[in-house]
Image (cartoon, rainbow, N blue to C red):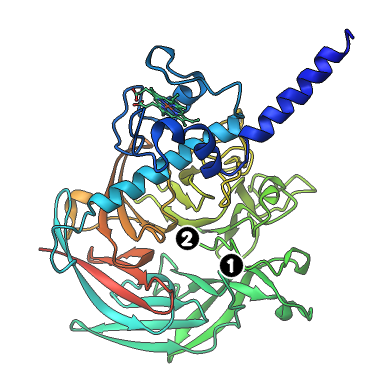
Amino acid sequence: MKFKMPFLFTILAFNCHTTFAAGNVSEVFKQNCASCHGESLQGGLAKSLVDNQWQYGSSDKDILATIRNGVAEAGMPAWKALLSEEEMRGLVVYIREQAYQAQQQQASPTADNQNNELFKTQGYQLSLDTVMSFDGALWAAAYLPNGDILATEKRGKLWLIQNTDGQYIKTEIKGIPDVWYHSQAGLLDVAVHPNYPRQPWIYISYSEPTSAKGKNSKGGMTAIARGQIMDGKWQQHQQIYSADVKFHTAAGVHFGSRIVLNNGYVFFSIGDRGKMDLAQDLTQPNGKIHRLYYDGRIPQNNPFIKDKQALASIWSYGHRNPQGLALHPVTEAIWETEHGPRGGDEVNLIEKNKNYGWPVITYGINYNGQPITDKTEQEGMEQPKHYWIPSIATGGIEFYRGKTFAKWNNNLLVTGMAKQELRRLVIEEEKVVIDEVLVKNQGRVRDVAVSPSGEILVVINSLDQGAGRLVILKSL
Ligand code: HEC
């Protein structure tokens, strides 16, 4: 008899867990919280959780602590014995998502703009001017020093957009490599050599088809090439990074692919390709920022050069899908944005040899509402400088420099696809102190670039991703 007690206990605890822990966050909420806080979190017996009014602290940590420990004197139960840490973290994401939706329904930043094209921001009133439309989705844009624009269309077209007295004319640059165009795969980033036109190199990232590696199967992997545009053609083609065919996969997701060139080095990102654990595996290119010389050689002072197992091109690791990479104009530090899972899009300051934690730590949960991990921090892993719950689906980023929006110098411009946003982050001493939405509800904002004269160019795709346009922000 003596031994039966613990056994019974185990069963009870287990049952308890399965009853309460249906897993999916919305189910967990419905079963445990809705009776007091309302089915749609609008309040009932207890207060609304979507009004952004917090009596017990408004940070994610505070909210998690309230759920964990309860507020006995107010009648809020403690949940730590009934729900797992993962589930309670999932509830924080869920509450944030629902609060965001409720807010959206109440008021959007464009509500007072009748024509939806004027945006009042801290510092400037903005208008949007479409300079060019495309009948395919765009991925990236970059300026040449003379004010011409390069833009990539995901299905495999590179465009040169020439500006003659304010008139824009586009020409397709023929002769770029074949790309695997499928789901998130295709022709991706474009970047210009910092010494252009003395060094007339243009860099592109793309999903290299597995067939190009001589293997007859569907799939691909991120590759980087450079070439020179002469007579409207891609010439002097050099592939500077191509993953071994054993790293190719048919998964159509998480190619990363942003390129930054500085000081003799090219930095580029590769996402986890849908296999999250590979981000921690130094023998795999997935989930990493890589660093090469401009011509593709591997710098001998890369962090893992002496590690026989590790890939020598790796600069930092533990990334999910880094789709934004930018050079700080003053410090020359590399900043990154990373597309998180459901919740937990991150802004990181990228440093040599560092581990950014995916998927061991994250502020997000799985898309299906299941938890990924209960950890948001761990020794030896970097914390994001900023993160978003719910996710904005971060794309390209760029630091502002110029005269047109002089008050915004050194601010980080961040794009959000799912949330259809262009944001501006003010960074002071490596901390994000202001996060402002500049543009909203104009389509999926995929990339941003700053012209040599200081104009802001935004790459926006239609919601069905069937068409793209280049838009210039003007200050009124
Ligand atoms: C028995 C009723 C009851 C249940 C069930 C309940 N709560 Fe509460 N909750 C309260 C009360 C009461 C408060 C205190 C605020 C108030 O007076 O409404 C509160 C407060 C909170 C707060 C803090 C709000 C603030 O202003 O800081 C959070 C967050 C919260 N609950 C989340 C949850 C979650 C998540 C669940 C489900 C796991 C849950 N609650 C289940 C009654 C409940």
Q: Split into 4 quadrants, where in the image is the N terminus?
A: top right
Which residue is denoted by mark 1 in the rendering? 295
Q: Within 10 angstroms of label 1, few (less than 14), some, or many (20 or more) residues?
A: some
Image disc number at residue 68: none
* Residue that sits furthest to the bottom in the current view: 231
Q: Which residue is located at x 30 percent, y 36 percent?
A: 52
Q: Quadrant of residue 117?
A: bottom left
Q: Quadrant of residue 131?
A: bottom left
Of residues 53 and 148, the one drawn nearer to the viewer in this rendering: 53
Query: Would residue 411 be seen by someone viewing this image from the given angle?
Result: no
Q: Within 10 angstroms of label 2, few (less than 14), some, or many (20 or more) residues?
A: many
Q: Which residue is located at x 59 percent, y 67 percent?
A: 295
Residue 179 left/right relative to 439: right
Disc 2 versus disc 1: distance between alpha carbons?
Answer: 11 Å
Which residue is denoted by mark 2 in the rendering? 261
Query: Would residue 147 be seen by someone viewing this image from the given angle?
Result: yes
* Residue that sits furthest to the top in the current view: 2
- The image shows residue 348 at horizontal and vertical percentages of 47, 44
- The image shows residue 35 at horizontal and vertical percentages of 45, 33
Does label 2 or label 1 sit earlier along the sequence? Answer: 2
**Position above or below: 210 against 414:** below
Of residues 445 and 115, the one drawn nearer to the viewer in this rendering: 115
The amino acid beneath tag 2 is: Leu
**Position above or below: 293 against 381:** below
Q: Quadrant of ligand 1?
A: top left
Marks 2, 1: nearer the viewer: 2
The amino acid beneath tag 1 is: Asp
